[in-house]
Image (spheres, rainbow, N blue to C red):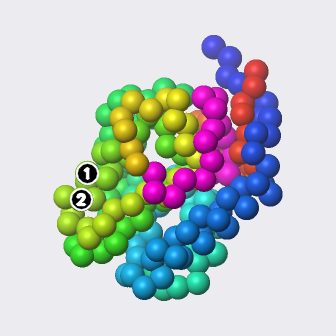
Amino acid sequence: MSYPTKPRVLIPRAEIDDVVTRLAAEISRDYRDKNLLMLGILKGAFVFMADLVRRLDFPLEVEFIRLSSYSSGQQTQGSVKVVQGLRRNLKGRHVLIVEDIVDTGITLSFLIDYLKKKKASSVRLCALTDKVSRRRVPVEIDYKGLTVPDKFLVGYGLDFNEQYRNLPDICVLED
């Protein structure tokens, strides 16, 4: 089996910067006076979340969770497990999930239910990219960056077998 290895730029860094700035303005408008906990999903969201929090000018807390729904390769397994859980009590907190890409919706649906069981005051979702063509479970994205095609994407935190996360642009892998 041969793996695609040549990345082609789909969304250049300048366009990503514009989207992150827009999302930060929307989040600032809605959360400026709230006790916000931004929850990044590892590993993919770390680059996006770092850029996003630097554009917010109000007090907030940052937390990470690591979930697993993909094996090595490109296909989801359909079940989700918590690999690294939360270290903070969420009761009464406003939680904003930060995700790099919403694909099938399986992982995000699981996480939203998980957080609601922890009695968060509110749970909303900010996603840099939305691959709506692959959705299997409905998920509401409160702060959406860009809709992307049904291609395997890498760069800006997105990976293929732990490679390519460091690319500054969002790219498509080609053979």
The reply to whether dot 1 and dot 2 touch (C-beta < 8 Å) is yes
Amino acid type assigned to the residue bearing label 1 in the image:
Asp
Label 1 neighbour load within 10 Å: few <14, some 14-19, many 20+: few
Q: Is residue 143 magenta?
A: yes
Picture quarter with the C terminus: top right
Alpha carbon distance from label 1 to label 2 = 5 Å
Sort mark 2 into few (<14), some (14-19) or many (20+) by Cα contacts within 10 Å: some
Residue 1 vs residue 25, the one in the foreground:
25
Which residue does the numbered mark 1 point to in the structure image? 113
Inspect the magenta stretch and tell me whether residue 60 lies in it: no
**At 26% from the left edge and 70% from the top edge, which residue is drawn?**
121
The reply to whether residue 104 is visible in this rendering is yes
Q: Residue at x 27, y 59 (%)?
A: 115
Question: Of the residues shown, which amino acid type is indicated by label 2?
Answer: Lys
Q: Position of residue 138 (x, y in %)?
A: 37, 38
Percent x, y of residue 145: 60, 53
Q: Residue at x 46, y 74 (%)?
A: 30
- Bounds of the magenta segment: 141-158
